[in-house]
Image (spheres, rainbow, N blue to C red):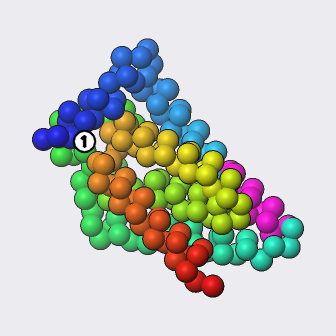
Amino acid sequence: MYYPRLYGILSGPWRRMRNGATWLTRLDRVLVALIAIVYYMTVMWVAAMGDERWLRALIVPAATLVIVSFLRWIINAPRPYETFNVDPLLPDGTLGKSLPSRHVACAVVIAFALGWIKLSWGIEMGAAALLVCYTRLAGGMHFPRDVIAGIALACVCGLIGFYVIP
């Protein structure tokens, strides 16, 4: 029963803040939008520059998204608010499909893609991905195992897709 205590620690500051749930929701949405916009703009820029890396930078994250979505469908793990009596700060009504976290996996593999193009971009995007990990946990949408699984899967896909395959 560690999860309700951990969730209380992570969500506590947001619950004590006036309109904290709204601010956490906005932070989560802004991060997701920022990551997507920066990613798509980077891929388009790389393609416009005639750099052939744009195609792999598009394929590897897309393949990761498909793999994560398939695993979520197969595993169909319950979400924290289905298992414990916790009130999520980022409610979306989704039941199951918690493991692995798709938001986290996509953010991390996008960080790999941008880092493959330019290391400093990947580091910056990695920091944004870590914030997504936090918002998904503090918002009560995922267990720590879901976030860790999303990170691990994205790292495997990113390493193979960008550094192992020539």
What span is in magenta?
Answer: 37-48
Which of these two is toward me, 102 or 124? 124
Q: Give the residue at x 27% y 67%.
A: 75
Which of these two is toward me, 115 or 49? 115
Tell me: 6 left or right of 158: left
Q: Give the residue at x 59% y 57%.
A: 111
Tell me: 111 left or right of 94: right
**Farthest top residue in view:** 18
Residue 50 within the magenta-colored segment of the rendering: no
Tell me: 22 left or right of 127: left
Q: How many marks?
A: 1
Quadrant of the image for the N terminus? top left
Indicate whether 25 appears above or below 18. Answer: below
x then y, percent, for residue 138 = 37, 36
x then y, percent, for residue 144 = 30, 49
Main SS class of the magenta portion in the image: helix
| Location of residue 6 (image quadrant) | top left
Q: Give the residue at x 40% y 63%.
A: 152
Which kind of residue does numbered mark 1 sit on? Answer: Tyr
Which of these two is toward me, 87 or 159? 159
Quadrant of the image for the C terminus? bottom right
x then y, percent, for residue 10 = 33, 32
Q: Give the residue at x 20% y 36%.
A: 4
Residue 45 within the magenta-colored segment of the rendering: yes
**Farthest front residue in view:** 119
Residue pointed to by mark 1: 81
| Location of residue 8 (image quadrant) | top left
x then y, percent, for residue 42 = 74, 58
